[in-house]
Amino acid sequence: MTGVLESALRSNRDAGKKALVPYITGGLGDDWVESLRASAANGATAIEIGIPFSDPVMDGPTIQLASEQALQSGASPVSVLQQLRGADIGVPLAVMTYYNIAHSMGLERFASSLLESGVSAAILPDMPLEEAGKWAAVADAVGIETVMLAAPTGSDERLAQVCERARGFVYAVGLLGVTGVRDKLAESSLQIASRLKNLTDKPVLVGVGIGTPEQAAQVCTVADGVVVGSAVVQRLLDGEGPEGVGQFVGEIRVALDEL
């Protein structure tokens, strides 16, 4: 059975639109939930919410700083999920965090907490395919979609296995290294998107290294959509708040709709 997130992304694709998934660090400022609403109101197809972690190995300096600030202000997995309960953002939500948090909470409790908070999917970037079985079984049982990351270094055989296990969408890693804005779109972003599109009918979204409306549009000439993280979070760090986030998301939406 197709989950809430994947259904939304497929419907979006069937309507001829490209998916836009902004990333926002949970607990960053008192009005972070309003930034989710602003994103949805300005054209986000779904939203990725980062649960702050003390050792975020995939995240670059922008999201690391955001996580540090959120943790210092008292954010925790429990508090972030509690604030989402009843928030009614209007688009599917996915959380991004590290396996240690899920393991520490207990896999069943973590999955149930996501469900109770209105979250549809989970992204655990440090969980390799070979070790995904236990979590994936728990998540599948309660209806949480496990988004899998697909690296540009993977063989076609491995990427096919990742696509088979993925729920919600296949997260194409646009370039090797940590998250962050780059001056220009990496060629590997287009290459990994093209390879994955040849391997699966599931929605393929590219993240990592996409920071401008122009880059988002460029990668969406191949991919079904984009995940934009550091460039969104930077606006919150700069004090632009929900209004600044909404404006930026709207600018990306316009660029994607012009394709």
Image (cartoon, rainbow, N blue to C red):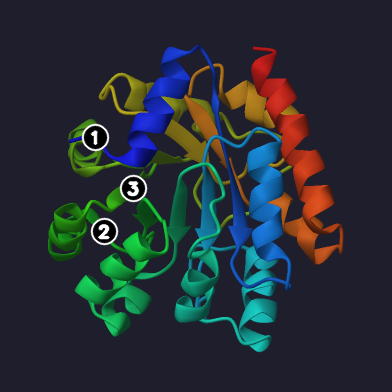
Residue at 30 percent across and 82 percent down: it is 105
| Residue with the mark numbered 3 | 147
Quadrant holding the N terminus: top left
Pointer 3 with pointer 2, Cβ within 8 A: no
**Where residue 35 appears, x then y in whole percent?**
70, 55
- Which of the two labelled residues, at mark 1 and mark 3, occupies the earlier sequence position? 1
Relative placement, left or right, of 211 versus 190 is right
Q: CA distance from mark 3 to mark 2?
A: 12 Å
Secondary element under disc 2, as helix, strand or loop, is loop
- Whether 26 is drawn above or below 186: the answer is below
| Residue with the mark numbered 2 | 128
Residue closest to the eye, 173 or 242? 242
Q: Residues within 10 Å of mark 2 (few under 14, many from 20)?
A: few
| Residue with the mark numbered 1 | 2
Residue at 69 percent across and 28 percent down: it is 253
Residue closest to the eye, 111 or 83? 83
Q: CA distance from mark 2 to mark 1?
A: 23 Å
- Which of the two labelled residues, at mark 2 and mark 1, occupies the earlier sequence position? 1
**Where residue 148 appears, x then y in whole percent?**
32, 48
Residue closest to the eye, 190 or 22? 22
- Which of the two labelled residues, at mark 3 and mark 2, occupies the earlier sequence position? 2
Pointer 2 with pointer 1, Cβ within 8 A: no
Secondary element under disc 3, as helix, strand or loop, is strand
Relative placement, left or right, of 173 versus 180 is left
Residue at 64 percent across and 30 percent down: it is 216
Residue at 20 percent across and 33 percent down: it is 160
Identified by mark 2, the residue type is: Pro
Identified by mark 3, the residue type is: Val
Q: Residues within 10 Å of mark 3 (few under 14, many from 20)?
A: many
**The label number, if any, that marks residue 117 in the structure image:** none
Quadrant holding the C terminus: top right
